[in-house]
Amino acid sequence: MKIELRDAAERIQAANNIVVAAHINPDGDAVGSSLALLLILRAMGKNARALLDDDIPPNFTILPHINDIEHPVELSETEIQADLLVVLDTQPDRIGSVSKMVKAPILNIDHHITNEGKNVSWLFLNANAAATCEIIFDLIEFLPVALNEDIAHCLYAGIATDTGFFNYANTRPSTLRAAAVLIEAGVKPNVIAEEMERKSLADFKGLCEALKTMEFFYEGKVAGLFINEAVAHLVDSTEGFIDQIRVIDGVEIAFVLTCRSEDIYRVSMRSRTVDVSKIARNLGGGGHIRAAGCTLRKPFDEAKECLLKAIGEAVKDID
Ligand code: AMP
Ligand code: MN
Ligand code: MN
């Protein structure tokens, strides 16, 4: 059921044992929104835990209380009792094993236009919000809790990364107003930016390897990188690789095809105007108009062909 933000706050107030989760392969918004909500819930006196079924990229380790995020693989319990599971920044089919561990009504808070609200009790969706962190910022208004410096850091990190540091089309006046309030609460934008943009040497070398694989398709309207298993093992994260090629003159859609394991490939797409969320949705994934992704369970050649066919349909009418 779709609900308003005020109702989402009521659902939270009514629960005592709350688990917070976000998507696998977590980005700044997934980590920032989970951590911010965890801190908010604790400030409200709730018994709250945050569970992420994946490693957290090292860039986010500067966030306050980052070590309070728990990982299912490290837990001895197989089932966690809760009266509410809050799923952030994704639909609940992308939270990995957390969905098996926590059997509770789901409150889903998200900004992905492709979220259809399947298998959730309540969905608050604002596809205009630049980040789930922007929604959590708005949610504070409806909760008996005050913004503090720790919460502000987490929210700012999510908003800054999901907007490409306020560069992307999802940056709205309200996004910048929220950022201003977060800076007033103590966030240092340069400190967050430096940490988020930091790359390990291994990741940088991985990027160099990945760039050697660059191919153009459809008269240069599409550019792609291919990260094989060896390079994928070399790096901690491929975050940002796609940004190197999406800026090339004439490129409408940029993609990165990354090997996760044998016959499993993750697709990242970015576009200038084309709606890549539709392409991703047709391939079993989702996302936003200009940034979307999916996972293809096929051998490399088939994955590449299937992706290029879908992308080709989308760019065929562009001059
Ligand atoms: P990424 O390229 O990983 O940065 O993802 C771009 C956007 O698409 C993000 O908002 C992701 O949450 C979303 N996305 C990526 N993969 C999937 C997927 N398999 N299903 C749904 N959304 C996805
Ligand atoms: Mn995300
Ligand atoms: Mn997000």
Image (cartoon, rainbow, N blue to C red):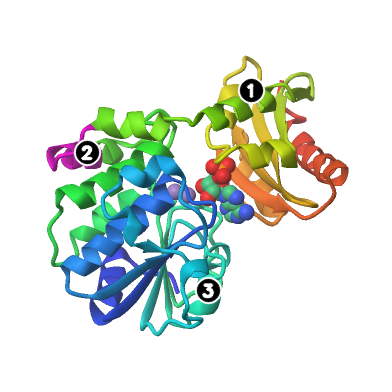
Where is residue 15 shown, x and y percent of the image? 28, 81
- Regarding mark 2 in the picture, which secondary structure is present there? helix
Q: Is residue 223 above or below residue 143?
A: above
Q: Which residue is mark 2?
A: 177
Where is residue 86 shown, x and y percent of the image? 39, 69
Q: Which residue is mark 3?
A: 99
- Regarding mark 3 in the picture, which secondary structure is present there? helix
Image quarter for residue 173?
top left
Viewer-side residue, 229 vs 309:
229
The answer to which of marks 3 and 1 sits earlier in the sequence is 3
Nearer to us: label 1 or label 2: 1
> Is residue 204 shown left or right of residue 215?
left
Identify which residue is drawn at 71% across, 23% down.
221
The span picked out in magenta is: 177-188
Q: Is residue 42 above or below residue 148?
A: below
- Amino acid type of the residue tagged 2 in the rendering: Arg
Identify which residue is drawn at 34% across, 28% down.
194
CA separation in Å, label 1 and label 2: 37 Å
- Amino acid type of the residue tagged 1 in the rendering: Cys
Task: Assess disc 2: are there few (<14), some (14-19) or many (≥20) residues with their C-alpha within 10 Å of its C-alpha.
Answer: few
Image quarter for residue 16?
bottom left
Identify which residue is drawn at 76% across, 22% down.
216
The answer to which of marks 3 and 2 sits earlier in the sequence is 3
- The quadrant in which the C terminus is found is top right
Q: Which residue is mark 1?
A: 208
Q: Are marks 1 and 2 in contact (CB under 8 Å)?
A: no
